[in-house]
Image (spheres, helix red, strand yellow):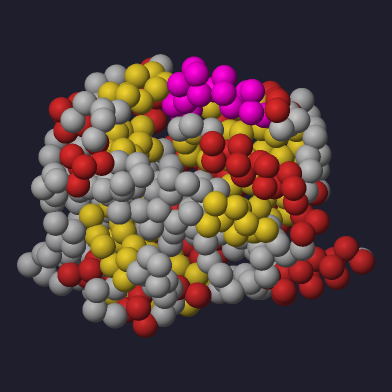
Amino acid sequence: MQPPNLCRDLGMHVHGDVALGRLIAPALRRNPRRAHLLVSTVLGKHIPAEPAAVRSAADHLTDLVALELHGEPCVVFGFAETATGLGHCVAARLDAAVYLQSTRRTGATVYGEFTEGHSHATSHLLQPSSPDLLSAADVLVLVDDEISTGATALDSIRALHALAPHRRYVVASLVDVRSPARAAENTRAAADSGLDIVFVALAHGTVDLPDGLPERVAGLPATPFNPVAGRRGTVEVLSAPWPSDVPDGGRHGVLAADQSRLRDAAAEVAAELAPHLDGRPVIVIGHEELMYLPLCVAESLAADGHRVRFQTTTRSPALVRDEDGYPLRRGFEFLSPEPDPEAPRRYLYNAQWAGEEARIVLIVDSPADTDRLRAPGGLLDVLAAAGHDVLVAIVPASDQSELAAARAEAAQQ
């Protein structure tokens, strides 16, 4: 697989099977711990993707997981922020007993946490509506977009095993780029810890990185963030309906019985948005960890005949270069809608429809509906300055204690 010229010229090479070339595009970021970035073409994070392609990739990954489960019930766990939607897709297709994601958002009861060494935001918090959700089945499926070394997966499993031991663990990812030596090391480490762990992925390969890459990337010129158009776009804000007893995502856990109700509630959000669309193609943008709900909205809009792509904002700063072959052609840097002293800025990449002006549909939950969202330098401001007409849907966020109470009441009936 030939990477973009920029990456190849720096000595970064990605080797793998044919599937790997379809699923990722190499890019760069200014991070002293990890200067390379494997941009997924089917995740809906950095690149706007067709909703059907996002769902299809997740379904194919799920089918590989199912081969390892042999019909056993499972709990599915997704990693924030990037894999929250992917993990939810896997859980939905498996009809998993519980889907739970980690989160970086504070403000709810935390039942556990672990850290991720190379990430831009290292803390993963566990905030289920009740701690027993993790123990709803003997097998735990952990879903991430990429396995690079396996270290994060193993550290996470050790932390989760201390909270709620499971008999078996399945680590599922879109791509696995561990070296053979690293994979063997993971196998030995799992055995030494007394853990039964298997890895599955849609594509496999390796990444060769030159010495001094972080320093070389830091010195590269970049296309500036926040392009400005000759016409300022418009902003329209709607309050979207959402049932208080239906989780809006996996932060507090999604039960198998919740899945169809969540999809129905997302279809209602799409129905509220549809009359405000005007025939232009639509890019549905979610807010960081809020990936699955916007994906379901995008799927509903597509089913109604709209031309739709889906992606989300991110915490991760990356190198933007407007040149052929490089996956991050333009970018936006903006105030974090939710105050975050450790990481006050957020990012959005591409958000374009080739050859046409697209309508932006931004879906955020209520904690992100802040003055910072609307302030100069906030997301709405930088998108409008780039000429985008933005339709914003504010979805009430699920409350941990309300979900716990509703579930306790349902269990007694």
Q: Which corner quadrant of the image does residue 148 belong to?
A: top left
- Above or below, 224 relative to 60: below
Seen from the viewer's position, the closer of residues 26 and 44 is 26
- Above or below, 372 relative to 62: below
- Left or right of 394? Residue 231 is left
Q: Main secondary structure of the magenta part?
A: helix
* Residue 274 % position (x, y): 42, 64
Whether residue 34 appears in this view of the structure is yes
Q: Which corner quadrant of the image does residue 257 belong to?
A: bottom right
* Residue 297 % position (x, y): 49, 57
* Residue 272 % position (x, y): 47, 69
Question: What residue is shown at x 73% (from left), y 44% (from top)?
Answer: 161
Q: Which residues are magenta?
A: 174-190
Q: Is residue 188 magenta?
A: yes
Question: What residue is shown at x 13% (from left), y 44% (from top)?
Answer: 220
Seen from the viewer's position, the closer of residues 363 and 267 is 363
Q: Residue furthest right?
A: 412
Seen from the viewer's position, the closer of residues 149 and 49 is 149
